[in-house]
Structure formats: C-alpha cells, structure tokens
Amino acid sequence: MTPQNIMAVTKSAEQNLKKNPLTRLFPWLGNIRITISTKLILGYLLVIVFISAVFMVIGVRLINDLVLSEAQEKVRNDLNAAREIYLGQQTHIYDVVNLTAKRFCLRDALVVENREQVTAVLLSVQQEAEIDFLVATDPYGYVVARSGNPDLVGDNQGYDEIVQAVLSQERTIAATALIANEDLAKESPLLAEKAHIEFIDTDLARDREETEETSGMVIKAAAPIYDSTGDFIGVLYGGVLLNRNYEIVDKIKQTVYENIKYKDQDVGTATIFQDDLRISTNVRNEDGSRAIGTRVSEEVYNQVIVKGEPWIDRAYVVNSWYITAYEPIRDMYDRIIGILYVGVLEQKYLDIQRRSTLTFLGISVAGSLISMVMSYVLAQSILKPVYKLVAASKEVAEGNLEAKVDIRTNDELQYLADTFNSMSAALQKRDEQLKEFTTQKVMESERLALVGQLSANIAHELNNPLQGIVTFAYLLLEDNSCEDPNTRYSLEKIAGQANRCRDIIRGLLDFSRQRRPDKTHCNVNEVLNECAAFQCR
C-alpha cells in the first residue's frame, strides 16, 4: 500500500469516527480502545438488558392488571351472589306473607272479626318466620291487628305504597321501601328506636346538613286476603327492618367469603346503605365495632345514587382500601333508595401483586444472568477462531509465510480462515517469485558491475595511448616541415578523432567512478544537453 493510500484510509477512518453520534456526544470515547470481545459482550448485555427491562415493565404491568381485573371480576361475582341473598330474603318475606294470607284460621278470624285470634296468628307467624312485623287490614286499609303492637289498631295504612298497590291490584307484592319513624313506632317502638342512627364523620363522604337518620329501610311484602267465597276482605303486610339487622350482610360474608381473615382483617365485607348511610354492615371501625353511621364516599355516591350506575373499582371504606362493587337498591317504583355493597380487602391483592411481581422479577433477573453467561460463552466461541487468526497473522508478519489456520465452524469465520490460508499461500508463492527475481537482478547487477569495472580498466588503459596520439598529432601539426595539405588534413583528423575518443573515455571514467550523492542546484537544460552530447559521441 502506497503512502497516499494509507493517508486516504486514515482520513476516511477519522471521518467515520467523527460521524459516529456517540463520539460526537462523548469525544473521549474516540480515545478508548475497546476489544471485539468487550464489544460483543457489551452488545449482548445491551440487548439482554433492554429486552429484560421491556419484558419486566410489560410483565409487571400485565400482572398488576391481571390481579386487579381478577379482583374486580371476583367482586362482580360476589355482588351477584350478594344480590341473590338479598333477593332471597325478599322472597322469603314474600312467601311468608303470601302463605299466611291464605291460612284458613286467619281468614275465618277476619270474617268473624275475632281480633284476638287474628293477633295470635300474626304473632305466631312472626316468631316462626323471624320477621319484625306482621299486620292485617280491612279492605280499606285500616289496621285490624298487629303482631308487634297489638293495642294499636284502626289507623289507616292505605297511603303506604305497597299496601296501596295491593288494595288496587289485589296481588302479592314484595319490595324494599323506606318507612318514616312514626310509622315504625306504630309497628313497634323498638323498631323506631332501632332505625334511629346518628351520622359519624367519614373521610371522603359528601357534605350533609343532617346529623341523624330516623326513618328505616325495610324489605316489605303485602298480599290480599280472600274469604271462602273469594271476596276481597283485607290486606296482610309484613317485613324486616334492615337498620342494624346484620342477618343479610353476615350471611353474605359467611357464604361468599367464608369469614376468612387476612392480617386480622376480614377479607370480604358487605353493607346495606340507606341512601349514603351504612345501616347494616360488617365493616369494622378501629375499635372493632360495626361501622353503623358511617357513610359512603362522595365519588361512589355520585356514581351509584345520582347516576344509578354500578361501581366496580377500588374505594376507601371507613379506614381501609377495598376492591369494591356497589349497585343501587330500588323501591317498587324504581327509585334509588339505597346501595348494596360487597368488597374484598385490597391489601391482600396488593400483597399478591407484590409477590407475583417479585417472583417475576426474580425469574427475569435469573434469566438475564443465565443469558449473560451464555452470551459470554458464545462470544468466546466466536472470538476463539479470531484469536487463532490474530496469532497466525502475527506469524505471517514476522516472516513465517507457512502459517496456516485450521477452523471448522461452517460459517463466515471458516470462510475467513480459508481466505487467510489462501492469502498466506499466495504470499508464500509471491515471496518465492520475488526471491528468484531478486537473485536474477542481483546477478545481472553484478555482471553489469564487472562489465563497468572492465570498461573502466580498458578506458584507463586506452587513455594513455590516445593521449600520446593526440600529443604527437599536434606536434606534427606544429612542425613546419609538414606543409602538404593532405597530410595536414589527415593529422587534424587524427587529432580530432583522438580527442573524441579521449572525451568518451573520460565520460566512462566519470560514470564508473563511485561518488557520494551531492545534491546541488543546476540548470536542467545544461544537464540534458551534456547527456545528449555524450550519447551522440
């Protein structure tokens, strides 16, 4: 390679280095020598780290989303189960009232206006069916008998929506309803007292001017009563007050969540709300008491009560975060009067997320480490043939042109090794040819040197006779006795040719004389003229 080619390659390398964005950002990188082994390992590491990082981020996100969606799906199913339990209680009250209204003893006692017997039947059914009140009215809605407050009769219950619907439609109806405190007091003073709940300040709840709730929410059923001839003779209604009644919520907790605890907290909870007020719940306060009187958060209230849409998401419940499901409770006219809630403790799923994430990260890190080791082994397997090529190249550089590389990898490295071996063989052949050519040229140079030396000796030997010829020719010309023109012409010819031979011999002697090169300024034209004149002699 010529110096010009070397300079061009160097300049191109410098330009490529300047074009490298990393070198432009970090100029000091251009001064660092990085081995191929390091580059390969770093390249593998960068790929492994990048893929592992992306894999971890996506994996952790998927795990979190999966756990959250699983929790939400669970509470959605739990809400369905809770609704069935709630409706099961409503169906139970419906059946109790409907079957009691068809009892012969009740019908006959109403026909003969035997209030004591009617009251006895109602009290017996109430105790047996475990409901809070059972009341019989005449065809106009006036109370004939009460199980919970036998002495209070004669008041009109025809304004009650459920009783009014039965009076007009003469069919059994069951629904959830709100009953004013004074109406509860008529059924039983204990029910009115039980319905009274004072509000407890709750974080994230909406602002309300009221400080207490006196009305009650009941599951109520009413059925028509007919005599033996099929004439409508009255209405039987009864129900269960939900305020401070924990039968439904505890049944939900036991059936759906099996009363399982997690870190001394119930895994699952259930609540019945009257508007936004907890009236029946197994959510606990800090002191372990039921959180009666606390209220739902404003965000959930707006979603469920105001918009009438279910809420399935995380929510703050009294003092902890839960994965919750809320749906509205409606009365017989589809008005929203409360909320049915179920929820599972979020901390349990957060711990599941954390354990799953740590397990996933551990597997990812272990996989990355194994990949790093494998990348190192792979890099070494790639570099081992390269090291062989480097060693063989050094041998060739040191003069051992017989150096060969034996690589059997069936890939580009083997092709490179075969090419190297071909190059080494070509260099060896060319070296032999060069040696032969050099030997030939040396022999020719020696022959020329001998010829030159012989020529110099001959020239030196010829110089003296020629000098004598020239001298004697001039002496004869100077002799006045030689006046013949032909003779004089011949002598001048002899002297001229002798001088010419002398100049040629002097030129040969000057050319063959060994002298050190002496660089001086000269006229090129004069040098060329001298060479031409010497060549023409």
Image (spheres, rainbow, N blue to C red):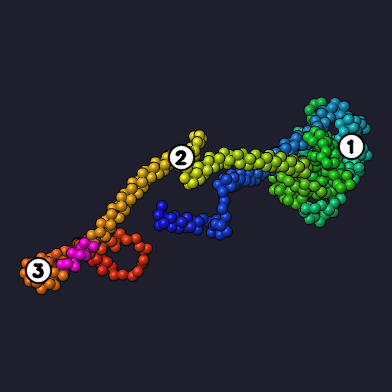
* Magenta residues, start to end: 464-474
Q: Nearer the viewer, mark 2 or mark 1?
A: 2
Q: Is residue 467 magenta?
A: yes
Mark 2 to mark 1 CA distance (whole Å)? 121 Å
Mark 3 to mark 2 CA distance (whole Å)? 77 Å
In percent of the image, x 13 and y 69: which residue is there? 476
Would you say 241 lies left or right of 58 here? right
Q: Nearer the viewer, mark 1 or mark 3?
A: 3
Split into 4 quadrants, where in the image is the C terminus? bottom left
Which residue is the site of mark 3?
488
Identified by mark 3, the residue type is Arg
Q: Position of residue 263 (x, y in %)?
A: 83, 41
In percent of the image, x 21 and y 65: which residue is there? 467
Quarter-wise, where is residue 137 in the image? Answer: top right
In percent of the image, x 55 and y 57: which residue is there? 30
Q: Which mark is residue 146?
A: 1
Q: Is residue 135 magenta?
A: no
Which residue is the site of mark 2?
402
Q: Position of residue 408 (x, y in %)?
A: 50, 34
Mark 1 to mark 3 CA distance (whole Å)? 185 Å
Q: Is residue 27 above or below residue 281?
A: below
In terms of secondary structure, where does tag 3 sit?
helix
Q: Is residue 449 above or below residue 147?
A: below
* Label 3 Cα crowd, 10 Å radius (few <14 / some 14-19 / many 20+): some
* Label 2 Cα crowd, 10 Å radius (few <14 / some 14-19 / many 20+): few
The secondary structure making up most of the magenta span is helix
In terms of secondary structure, where does tag 1 sit?
strand
Identified by mark 1, the residue type is Arg
Q: Is residue 8 above or below residue 330?
A: below
Q: Position of residue 318 (x, y in %)?
A: 81, 48
Mark 3 or mark 2: name the one nearer the start of the chain: 2
